[in-house]
Image (cartoon, rainbow, N blue to C red):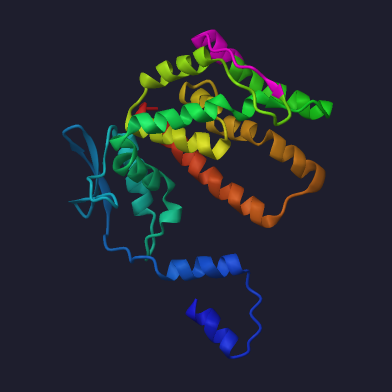
C-alpha cells in the first residue's frame, strides 16, 4: 500500500486494479514462514499437525488435532505448501479446521440449527417457470436430491416457482434435524455449514456428505441459475474470481468430509 501511495505522490499513473492493490498490500503484512517442515503424528484421540516437530495450534491456541491421518495430512500439506510467507487464503482446509476447533466444537447445536434454517428455504426448492430449458436443467440437477431425501429419510419438500417464500413441513425439517444429530461431529458439521453457505443449499451439502453427489456435481448444481445467466449475458472477471475462490473453499470442505470418513 505504501508503494501505491508513493506512486500517487510522485504523480505516476498507476492503473492497477484496486482490489489487486489491496490484495498485494495484505500479502506484504503476512507472517513469514517460521518452520522448515510440516508433518503429522499420532496422538491420543487423533492425529496432530506438527511444525518442526512442535504442536501446531489454532488462532485460539488450541491443539490442531484431527480424527484421522488423512484429515491431519490435509492441513499439514497446506502448511508445507507455503512459501516465504504464510497466506491463509491459500489454506482453506486449515481455516475450516480452525473454525471447527475454535468455534463449532463449542456449540455444535447452534451451527446445526443454522444448516436447518438454510434447508427450510433451500435453493433447490425454488424453481423457474420459464424458459423451458432452465426449468429442465433445474429438474435434472435438483430432483434426484429431493427424491433421495424422500426415499431415505421420508422427508418431502414443497417446491415453489419464483422467489416467494414457501413454508416447508415442520416434520420434514424435524427429520433432517434428527438425521444431522447422528452426524454432529464438529469437523463434519463445520464442513457441512461451509458447503451449505457457499451453495445456498443444505440439501446439496447433505447429498455430498452421504455420497449421493460428488463435490463437483453439487457445485455445478448450485450454479445452474448463475450459469444460465452467464450463458445469456456473459460474466465479469471479478465475479469469476470470487466464484473460483469459493470453489476452493467448497473443495476443501468436501476433502475434509472425505478425509474424516477415511476415503
Q: Quick check: 231 left or right of 242?
A: right
- What residue range appears in magenta? 147-160
The residue positioned 54% from the left and 49% from the top of the image is 245
Residue 68 at what x, y percent from top left? 29, 32
Residue 260 at what x, y percent from top left? 35, 30
- In this rendering, the answer to whether 196 lies above or below 25 is above
- In this rendering, the answer to whether 17 lies above or below 57 is below
Please name whichever residue, 217 or 106, is drawn nearer the observer in this view of the structure.
106
The residue positioned 23% from the left and 42% from the top of the image is 48
Residue 219 at what x, y percent from top left? 59, 35
Please name whichever residue, 176 or 141, is drawn nearer the observer in this view of the structure.
176
Q: Quadrant of the C terminus?
A: top left
Q: Residue furthest bottom?
A: 10
Q: How many marks?
A: 0
Q: Residue furthest right?
A: 131
The residue positioned 50% from the left and 12% from the top of the image is 171
Q: Residue furthest left?
A: 44
- In this rendering, the answer to whether 184 lies above or below 240 is above
- In this rendering, the answer to whether 197 lies above or below 14 is above
Q: Quadrant of residue 179?
A: top left
Q: Quick check: 224 left or right of 10?
A: right
Q: Is residue 20 magenta?
A: no
Q: Is residue 158 magenta?
A: yes
Q: Quadrant of residue 138?
A: top right
- The reply to whether residue 259 is in sight is no
Residue 41 at what x, y percent from top left? 21, 41
- The reply to whether residue 172 is in sight is yes
Please name whichever residue, 167 or 143, is drawn nearer the observer in this view of the structure.
167
Q: Quick check: 133 left or right of 114?
A: right
Amino acid at each position: 500500500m505504501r508503494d501505491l501511495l508513493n506512486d500517487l505522490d510522485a504523480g505516476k499513473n498507476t492503473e492497477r486494479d484496486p482490489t489487486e492493490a489491496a490484495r498485494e498490500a495484505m500479502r506484504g503484512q503476512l507472517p513469514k514462514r517460521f518452520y522448515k517442515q510440516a508433518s503429522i503424528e499420532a496422538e491420543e484421540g487423533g492425529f496432530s499437525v506438527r511444525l518442526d516437530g512442535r504442536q501446531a495450534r489454532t488462532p485460539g491456541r488450541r491443539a490442531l488435532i484431527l480424527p484421522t491421518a488423512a484429515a491431519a495430512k490435509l492441513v499439514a500439506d497446506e502448511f508445507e505448501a507455503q512459501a516465504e510467507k504464510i497466506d491463509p487464503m491459500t489454506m482453506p482446509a486449515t481455516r475450516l479446521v480452525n473454525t471447527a476447533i475454535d468455534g463449532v466444537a463449542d456449540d455444535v447445536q447452534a451451527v446445526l440449527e443454522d444448516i436447518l434454517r438454510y434447508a427450510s428455504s433451500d435453493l433447490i426448492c425454488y424453481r423457474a417457470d420459464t424458459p423451458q430449458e432452465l426449468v429442465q436443467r433445474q429438474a435434472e440437477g435438483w430432483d434426484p436430491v429431493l427424491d433421495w431425501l424422500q426415499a431415505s429419510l421420508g422427508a418431502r419438500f414443497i417446491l415453489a416457482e419464483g422467489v416467494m417464500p414457501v413454508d416447508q413441513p415442520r416434520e420434514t425439517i424435524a427429520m433432517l434435524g434428527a438425521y444431522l444429530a447422528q452426524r454432529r461431529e464438529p469437523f463434519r458439521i463445520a464442513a457441512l455449514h461451509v458447503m451449505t453457505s457457499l451453495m445456498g443449499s443444505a440439501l446439496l451439502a447433505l447429498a455430498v456428505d452421504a455420497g449421493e453427489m460428488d463435490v463437483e456435481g453439487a457445485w455445478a448444481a448450485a450454479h445452474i441459475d448463475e450459469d444460465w445467466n452467464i450463458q445469456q449475458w456473459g460474466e465479469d472477471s471479478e465475479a469469476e474470481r470470487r466464484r473460483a475462490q469459493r470453489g476452493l473453499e467448497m473443495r476443501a470442505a468436501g476433502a475434509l468430509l472425505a478425509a474424516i470418513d477415511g476415503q
